[in-house]
Amino acid sequence: MVKENEVAGRLEWRVNMPNGSSRILAPESRETCSRLQSLVMGIVLNIKAFLDKAWNLAVNEPKKVVHCLKVGLALSLVSVFYYMRPLYDGVGGNAMWAVMTVVVVFEYTVGSTLYKCVNRAIGTCLAGSLGIGVHWVASQAGDKFEPVILQVSVFLLAAAATFSRFIPTIKARFDYGAMIFILTFSLVSVSGYRVDKLVELAHERVSTIAIGASICIFITMILCPVWAGTELHHLISNNLEKLADSLEGYAAENFSVDGSKNVHEKDSSKRLQGYKCVLNSKAAEESMANFARWEPAHGKFNFRHPWKQYLKIGASMRSCAYCIETLHGSINSNTETPEFLKKPLNDVCMRLGTTSSKVLKEMSSMIKTMKKSTKLDILVDEMNSSVEGLQNALKIFPSYQHIPTPDPGTEEAPNGKEEPSLKPTALSLMEIVQMATLTSLLVEIASRIEGIVEEVKELATQAEFRDESSMKSKQTQTKINGNDGNEHEVTMKTLQKV
């Protein structure tokens, strides 16, 4: 028997048990509803945050959206071989291999797609040919020795191909091809033991793979191509500019006058991310350089463009970025350099940071435009003169500073205030070490920038950058010739009138 009572405006249920006792059933707690509501709201907010990130990614990098559309188009085209009966019969019912090829091979850049297509073609053809040959040899040995020969061949060739993937040169260019070789040879060898028409089966699979790879190459090179070489070129140029901004920012933050320091603090996070991007770009540079070797000539880049030189420039930039990271750590350390100690060196240190930043920016512009700069040597000379100025300032820098300290024995001034007297106070060891670290890091950064300059000049020589001075002289000569031609025309018209 259940009784319903209303106590203090609250609904209460009481159940009478058979043994005479009663039990109160509490109503459903509101906490359960609130937890459920918060859980649903949390899921909705997470989905909204994910959609916002996806939208921002699509807006900031529209090339990736275009890549997704290209993949969908390639899959739609290759699926025609599966849906249309004549095409399906023409490939022997193995059209699914073409679909799998598109899914596996299609990549973001042209170089990476060509890399996978060529490796897949070489690995498939080589493994298929060896598989058919081993199958023929095994079939001639008789039924007893056929499975033994097949198993031994699979073991030896798979082990040899796997070992080749550890060789640096093979791993850099043909790692994917070695993996496809192992897969194809194992499939052909194992399936050939039960399949009678092995040659026909291998021909059909090679044909479908060729169809899928051809569609991928055609779409990735014709429709809004993304070249790995161009991406590497822009990456190196942008990293040089980020490195320059970081160096200039940290120098201004530590050696600027008090009035301009707050302005630089607003952009400190951007400068921090600047040199970190340089430190974290090694893997991207190596992969882009590897894929760029597979690309044909495009835009300003020839087929034999020196892509390896970009890796040397990247390595030199990272060595400079490590010094900037150390400079950042010294600036943010617990031991702060007193202002009276930095003041005599503020100008020379600020000048060194500014000139070094100008050299990096000039190299960034030089790579971006692919033109030899006439200003680079001048800016390097200014940077070296700034280094000499800092070294000379350190030589005459005193080992102690006159710091205003109150003297108990001083007399009171007429206005009733005590005037502090100037007394020589020795500097602490940590303060001297901190200042020496900052200055030595600036000198070391300038030295490593000279290494970047040498690598950039080598790139300009190998890639045959255009000479800016010769271009200006040609333009000037063209203008002079044009003016002479105009004057000649005016003279002829005057003579005709006369």
Image (spheres, rainbow, N blue to C red):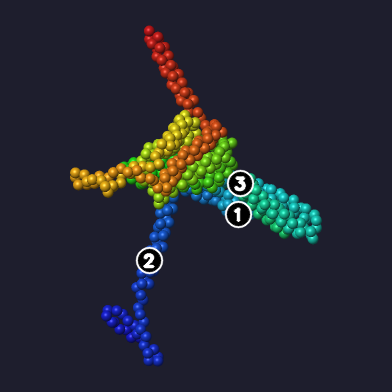
Asked if residue 349 lies left or right of residue 155, the reply is left
Between circles 2 and 1, the one closer to the viewer is 2
Label 2: few (<14), some (14–19) or many (≥20) C-alpha neighbours in 10 Å: few
Label 3: few (<14), some (14–19) or many (≥20) C-alpha neighbours in 10 Å: some
Label 1: few (<14), some (14–19) or many (≥20) C-alpha neighbours in 10 Å: some
Q: Under tag 3, what secondary structure?
A: helix
Q: Is residue 480 above or below residue 61?
A: above
Between circles 3 and 2, the one closer to the viewer is 3
Query: Do the numbered discs 3 and 2 sit on residues whose CB atoms are within 8 Å?
Result: no
- Of the numbered discs 3 and 1, the one sitting upstream in the chain is 1
Instruction: Find disc 1 in the rendering and name its residue.
Output: 96
Give the alpha-carbon distance from disc 3 to disc 1, as whole Å: 29 Å
Amino acid type at mark 3: Ala
Q: Residue at x 68, y 48 (%)?
A: 125
Q: Quadrant of the C terminus?
A: top left
Give the alpha-carbon distance from disc 3 to disc 2, as whole Å: 51 Å
Instruction: Find disc 2 in the rendering and name its residue.
Output: 38
Q: Residue at x 49, y 38 (%)?
A: 447
| Residue 487 in sight | yes
Query: 276 and 474: which one is in front?
Result: 276
Amino acid type at mark 1: Met
Query: 157 and 264: which one is in front?
Result: 264
Instruction: Find disc 3 in the rendering and name its residue.
Output: 172
Q: Residue at x 34, y 43 (%)?
A: 424
